Amino acid sequence: MKKRLGLDGLVVCCVMNAAQLRAYARKVPPDCDMLEVRLDAIGWNAEQWKTDCGRIQRQGMPVLLTIRLAKEGGHWVGPESVRMQLFQEGYPFVSAVDVEISARQAGQMMGTAHQAGRQVVGSFHDFEKTPSLAKLKQVEKRGRRLGADVVKMAFLMKRPEDEQTAAAMLSSASGPISIQGMGKRGLATRIPFARYGSCLVYGSLGRPAVSLQPTCRRLYRELHPPVRSCLNW
């Protein structure tokens, strides 16, 4: 696989609870390039999350706001109109948002993010298998069409063929892309893929967000400093 120079992986650390968010608002962790605030896991009824995100940003740490749908491994089961409103409330306090490519109002959400001057990660998840290369290319095409600045694909890898499919997707992508393998076999691809163009690599600060997720400390040690960001911070 030929290296795509200049897009080494940025380490994204997942914040999954309110206590972590409050702690990092006081002092950001040293082992990451970006904090993903999983508002679907933290809770959205209080106003404190926006203040905390703003404090993190002022320390020079970009915040990626995610409100993950339940059907793609998250906790959000509410109306899309409410989720869109939460994104809009968060724009002044974050650098980017994550929107599922399959979301019913994905195009509208990505559009409002761009209008607010925020970057968009268009995401896709499959917790059961590695889709075919043809399917992954369709997902990428839809994500680009909707307006994603980075297309993120996370899927379970079970066989050597799955690694080959993922590598082929990484090599043939038409723009910034993040390939996140899940499962034991997928975990082993995260650092190599980050070195070959997977521009965002996700890790845990405490308890992993998903099974076998690597720690941010390990990822940061292996990958820092990145050559160039795939997002315009």
Image (cartoon, helix red, strand yellow):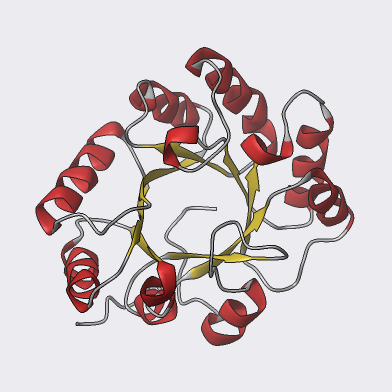
What number of labels is visible? 0
Which residue is located at x 77 percent, y 41 percent? 54
Q: Which quadrant of the view contains residue 161? A: bottom left
Position in image of residue 179 (x %, y %): 35, 63
Tell me: 199 left or right of 20. left
Position in image of residue 212 (x %, y %): 53, 70
Which residue is located at x 66 percent, y 46 percent? 37
Instruction: Work out whether residue 80 or residue 9 is closer to the camera in this orientation and state it.
Output: 80
Tell me: 221 left or right of 230. right
Position in image of residue 97 (x %, y %): 52, 40
Residue positioned most to the left: 134
Instruction: Work out whether residue 16 or residue 107 is closer to the camera in this orientation and state it.
Output: 16
Residue positioned most to the bottom: 222
User: Does residue 112 lie above or below 143 as drawn?
Assistant: above
Position in image of residue 45 (x %, y %): 77, 23
Tell me: 144 left or right of 180. left
User: Does residue 198 lie above or below 126 as drawn?
Assistant: below
- Is the N terminus in the top left, top right, bottom left or bottom right quadrant? bottom left
User: Does residue 91 lie above or below 178 as drawn?
Assistant: above
Which residue is located at x 81 percent, y 42 percent? 52
Q: Which quadrant of the view contains residue 24? A: bottom right
Which residue is located at x 40 percent, y 26 percent? 111
